[in-house]
Amino acid sequence: MKEKIQSLINEAKAKVEAAKELIEINELKVSFLGKAGAITSLLKGMKDVPQEQRPEIGKYVNQARDTISDIISNKMQELEQKALENKMMKEKIDITIDEVDATRGSLHPCTLVINEIVDIFTGLGFTVGNGPEIELDKFNFQLLNIPKDHPSRDMQDTFYAGEDILLRTQTSAVQARTMINTQPPIKIICPGKVYRPDYDATHSPMFQQIEGLVVDKHITLCDLKGLLDLFAKKLFDSNTKTRFRPSFFPFTEPSVEVDVTCSVCHGKGCRICKGTGWIEILGAGVVNPKVLDSCGIDSTKYSGLAFGLGVERIAMIKYGIPDIRILFENDSRFLKSFK
Ligand code: DAH
């Protein structure tokens, strides 16, 4: 009996060692340890063993069962580990592969200018407002003291999309929209696209403006001058000087145009400033009381200042760009120079 048991152990060892797949091990487990397996039939045969030998043989059989069970589960672990390693090898990701050449883009010079200007004004407590590019005549013109058929409409050629619908010609439309919806204090900056049928070296049918509006008690031309002088010094450099020339806009009274000392020749006169030493950067003024009243703000209590500038124009001045059209041609050699 003992020999039979030993040879069973040897047989199990040999078969398990030869097995290469988990499935074979499972089959061996059934054939040795299963209900109809070799060990079970040994245990069943115990009844034929003479009474006095039973304890010893019983112990032997139990040891054999434990040994075979150990052999099988060790091999199982080994094969499982191998299978896992194989799987990991197959799914291996090569993190040493060369970087794909995905060149990073850069911000458009106009976006750089908008970001910089918005930063300056938000730093002074302004919030950013906006309005639609397809606008009603009412907001683009009428509420800004530019009635229908008034000669001042000629200041801005317009793309109409219907009797009262147009592509906004100025971000000043956002002033009207804001005032009609909000009571003072108002302190906003509004960047956005505007449209006019013009096309040459300094005009494009689509261009961008930034509008500013402050409405509160006791706002005067002095506030406008102080604000815009500070702005010019932050945008160009701290030595920049500003000059306020009388002008006309229907929505401001008085109205001014603001010049800065040329950042190229510092006021001496050069090609960029056409020999004058000054460059015009924006239009501005004290909000016409008529505009406040038509937008539902009591002009006896409140006053305001407003200004509007052309983003492309500022970009051209800041970066020495001679022709506005370069900004819209998407020539990557030009755009890359702003990296
Ligand atoms: N909207 C004017 C334009 O497009 C610019 C402008 C001038 C805006 C004076 C203003 C302002 O807010 O006060 O020509």
Image (cartoon, rainbow, N blue to C red):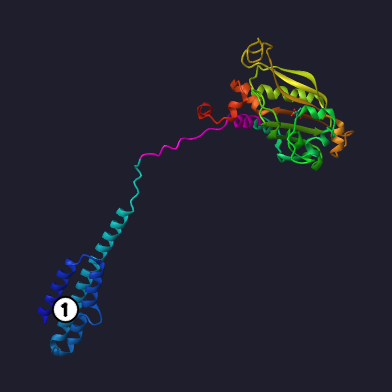
- The residue depicted at 17 percent of the width and 72 percent of the height is 12
Check disc 1 and give the amino acid type: Tyr
Q: Is residue 239 above or below residue 300?
A: above
Image quadrant in which you'd find residue 238: top right
Q: Nearer the viewer, residue 196 or 253?
A: 196
Residue indicated by mark 1: 60
**Secondary structure beneath disc 1?**
helix
Instruction: State the residue lying farthest toward the left.
Output: 3
Q: Nearer the viewer, residue 225 or 48?
A: 225
Image quadrant in which you'd find residue 290: top right
The crowd level at tag 1 (other Cα within 10 Å; few <14, some 14-19, many 20+) is some
Q: Is residue 165 left or right of residue 206?
A: right
Residue 29 spot, x, y in % from top left: 24, 74
Q: Nearer the viewer, residue 176 or 63?
A: 176
- The residue depicted at 55 percent of the width and 31 percent of the height is 330
Q: Is residue 53 above or below residue 63?
A: below
In the rendered image, is residue 297 in sight? Answer: no
Residue 81 spot, x, y in % from top left: 28, 60
In the rendered image, is residue 49 in sight? Answer: yes
Image quadrant in which you'd find residue 37: bottom left
Extent of the magenta region: 98-117
Residue 22 spot, x, y in % from top left: 26, 67
Residue 247 spot, x, y in % from top left: 80, 21
Q: Is residue 220 above or below residue 14?
A: above
Picture quarter with the N terminus: bottom left
Q: Is residue 105 magenta?
A: yes
- The residue depicted at 18 percent of the width and 79 percent of the height is 61
